[in-house]
């Protein structure tokens, strides 16, 4: 039977009230996103300190140390992008559409990143961040034990395999719909 032909049932007053409370409860997520904005500020502070440290030691540092410093900046940048993506997609997906006002710039991907897309983007970012940590470990291998390096690679591979499996599951689920 086609759902369009079924007449809509009028909800009772208590039922409507419960449904309004349930729907309104989405606003309980807003403080989480505000907290993530504070986390973004903390990442900016850490990034700024690392830039100052890198620039201050660039003349006396080895090329490996400069490379590790730059990788550290990239790592923080990827993490900030990840946090911002979660804030935007989560807010728009679960609370309300962001109103950027007249003439406001709306990012191309805003409103288009679904939960499945967000999971894949998050895991891809985690894999990239993990790869940076592995590279940092190998660039500073003289300060790392073989065991520590093996753990870095093992954990990174676990993230890679998880990302691949999640992408495969998402693709298979997409075929079913």
Image (spheres, rainbow, N blue to C red):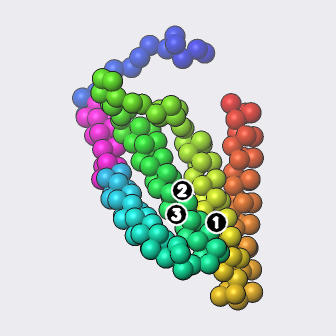
Find out whether the residues at labels 1 and 2 contact each other: C-beta distance under 8 Å.
Answer: yes
Tell me the CA gap for discs 3 and 2.
9 Å
The rendered magenta stretch, by its main secondary structure, is classed as helix
The residue furthest top is 5
Q: Nearer the viewer, residue 113 or 5?
A: 113
10 Å neighbourhood of mark 2: few (<14), some, or many (≥20)? some
Residue identifier under label 3: 73
Vertical arrangement, residue 26 with respect to residue 140, above or below:
above
Residue identifier under label 1: 132
Q: Is residue 87 left or right of residue 170?
A: left
Residue at left 45%, top 66%? 51
State the image coordinates of residue 98 (x, y, percent, origin top left).
Answer: 36, 34
Vertical arrangement, residue 72 with respect to residue 140, above or below:
above
Tell me the CA gap for discs 1 and 3.
10 Å
Q: Is residue 20 magenta?
A: yes
Q: Is residue 101 magenta?
A: no
Residue at left 44%, top 49%? 84
Mark 3 or mark 2: whose residue is earlier in sequence? 3
Quarter of the figure with residue 153: bottom right
Vertical arrangement, residue 148 with respect to residue 95, above or below:
below
Name the mark nearer the viewer: 1 or 3. 3
Residue identifier under label 2: 78
Q: Which quadrant is the C terminus positioned in?
A: top right
State the image coordinates of residue 62 (x, y, percent, origin top left).
Answer: 62, 78
Q: Secondary structure at mark 1?
A: helix
Q: Which quadrant is the N terminus positioned in?
A: top right
Vertical arrangement, residue 90 with respect to residue 142, above or below:
above
Q: Which residues are magenta?
A: 16-31
């Amino acid at each position: 039977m086609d759902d369009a032909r079924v007449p809509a049932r009028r909800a009772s007053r208590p039922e409507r009230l419960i449904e309004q409370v349930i729907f309104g409860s989405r606003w309980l997520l807003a403080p989480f996103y505000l907290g993530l904005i504070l986390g973004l500020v903390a990442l900016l502070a850490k990034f700024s300190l690392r830039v100052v440290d890198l620039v201050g030691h660039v003349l006396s540092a080895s090329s490996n140390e400069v490379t590790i410093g730059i990788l550290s900046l990239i790592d923080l940048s990827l993490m900030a992008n990840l946090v911002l993506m979660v804030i935007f997609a989560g807010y728009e997906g679960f609370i309300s559409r962001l109103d950027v006002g007249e003439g406001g710039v709306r990012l191309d991907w805003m409103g288009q990143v679904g939960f499945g897309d967000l999971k894949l983007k998050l895991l891809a970012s985690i894999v990239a961040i993990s790869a940076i940590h592995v590279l940092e470990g190998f660039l500073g291998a003289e300060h790392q034990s073989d065991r520590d390096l093996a753990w870095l690679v093992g954990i990174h591979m676990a993230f890679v395999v998880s990302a691949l499996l999640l992408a495969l599951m998402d693709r298979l689920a997409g075929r079913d719909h």
